[in-house]
Image (tube, grey):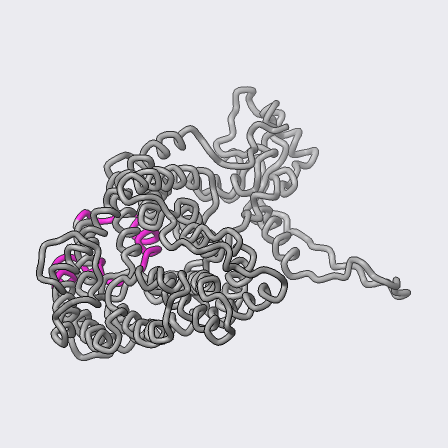
Amino acid sequence: FTPALRDFNLDRRVWLISGLAVIVGAGGAALAVLLLRAIALATNLFYYHRFSLQMVGPAGSPLGYWMVLVPIVGGIIVGIMARYGSDKIRGHGIPEAILLNGARVEPRVAVLKPISAAIAIGSGGPFGAEGPIIMTGGAFGSLLAQWVKLTDAERTTLLVAGAAAGMSATFAAPFAAVLLAVELLLFEWRPRSLIPVAFASVTAAVLRVMWLGAGPLFPLSAETIPSGARFAILAAVLGALVGLAAAAMSRMMYSFEDLFGKLPVHWMWWPAIGGLGVGVGGLFFPRGLGVGYDNIAILLAGRATLGLVFGVIVFKSLMWAFSLGSGTSGGVLAPLLMIGASLGALSAHLLHMPEGTLALIGMGAMLAGALGSPLTAIVFSIELTHALPALLPLVVACIASYTITSLIMPRSILTEKLARRGHHLTREYGVDPLEMVSVEDAMTEFADEHAAALTELPPAYTFPVYTFRDETCRSAAERMATTGHIRLAVLDRDTRQPRGYVSLQDLLIGRRRFVEREEDRERVFRLMRSQTPEPPAPAVTREEPREHPVEHVER
């Protein structure tokens, strides 16, 4: 047993960060409620010309053909705010706020983002409220973290905690909010960040029940959910088809973004042009305006007409992609849920099967494929509907969709924006190969003459930079990175006597083992043993350093 090595790197600061995360969770929930009320107020002002916080949709407005002008006005206001306030309020991205600028969100962005989102959505923008809510909660967490003396990693944790709190409060989905943080925001699975984020999400969920009521948002009757192998196969096929649609949605949206980039006008006017597209689309399909949570409820309840299904698939998709490509402020979750549910409902109409169940499966599959977050999509769909019997077909569909999009899409719909800014991002989680190799396995032991020379050192002599032989190669590599030394003395932890040295080249052993494990193929079990023995693998040699190890350590 070695007390220096543990399964997880965690210290007592987790209590401080968790305490701050509870505050962030409460603030994120409060901001979520305020933003939902602001969207309702903006909708009433734009479409009904009244001061009211009643949750209404633009489709019932008495404006008639004048409704086409409302999204244009909203786009002009958002463009002016972005030009003279902060251009960081534009777009739909979430991860860039975490990866860029050390998790520091400017105070004016924290204020302008929710206001611009309320105007964009309240004026008919076919976006989800959850994206701006997540960004606003994250901004609150970032501002609190900047006020306290914290590291970059701790600021990131509180920013993500605020984002998870916003999602938890909006959808009554605390578990899915934590998974979203892991799969799409934290880019790690560590107790140091997972614990505070969970505290924030649970805090927001508790306050959500007090302020907005308990879930589920879209209840689904469990009696309508089929079971069996045939339905599981159908779910897999539907998931794969929805995965193709998710890839098409992402490419369409970014194609519109490229198109706007070629326009000979300043980007400040792009949201107004996007608003024109939304207004025209709203003339043909008024239910495509605004967030449209009521449309999702109808689809999952199995009461959607073919007109609503085709309207969402055709008009809502075009309105959403065109307007979001213009750089206005809005979210992607609700439109993706609606489009995926419509694809599932369409398949139910064609196959004469329960519409609500297939709408649920299509909704989860669209989220899994577009975001590249299958665990979040599965749990999120269950928390939205409380339809636990649908878990098996939902898992099959989400994994099928995720498989398709992982093969044909280099990035998710959210991380593609980062790539277009020149920032590479990998979302594969795994243990560092250097963490699985000890220094003792990689070090070069001192020869007898070198060991004898070390015994002549003064008794009180201490090595300036060293590592213990029971530490991992990862900790040795971090020590090299922070000190600038490329060779460290290796000491015995109990006796503090030198046993050898480890060089930068020695640390490559862990990486080499990882590459061999990933690339070397062999048949371990054979039905009939071959008479011709296979040639032995070539031995891996390691070049010895030319410099005397003792002399280098003493310097």
Question: How far across and how far down the image is residue 404, in percent?
Answer: 52, 69
Labels in figure, total: 0
Name the residue rendered at 63%, 32% in the picture.
Answer: 499
Q: Is residue 546 left or right of residue 410?
A: right
Q: Is residue 465 left or right of residue 148?
A: right
Magenta segment, which residues? Answer: 80-107
Question: How far across and how far down the image is residue 282, in percent?
Answer: 22, 74
Question: How far across and how far down the image is residue 95, in percent?
Answer: 35, 55
Q: Is residue 70 left or right of residue 376?
A: left
- Residue 291: name its quadrant: bottom left
- Can residue 176 be seen? yes
Q: Nearer the viewer, residue 262 or 137?
A: 137
Q: Nearer the viewer, residue 48 or 152?
A: 48
Give the quarter of the figure containing the N terminus.
top right
Q: Is residue 224 above or below residue 211?
A: below
Q: Is residue 347 magenta?
A: no
Name the residue rendered at 44%, 63% in the picture.
Answer: 356
Q: Nearer the viewer, residue 499 or 547?
A: 499
Name the residue rendered at 80%, 58% in the picture.
Answer: 525
- Can residue 92 be seen? no
Q: Nearer the viewer, residue 25 or 39?
A: 39
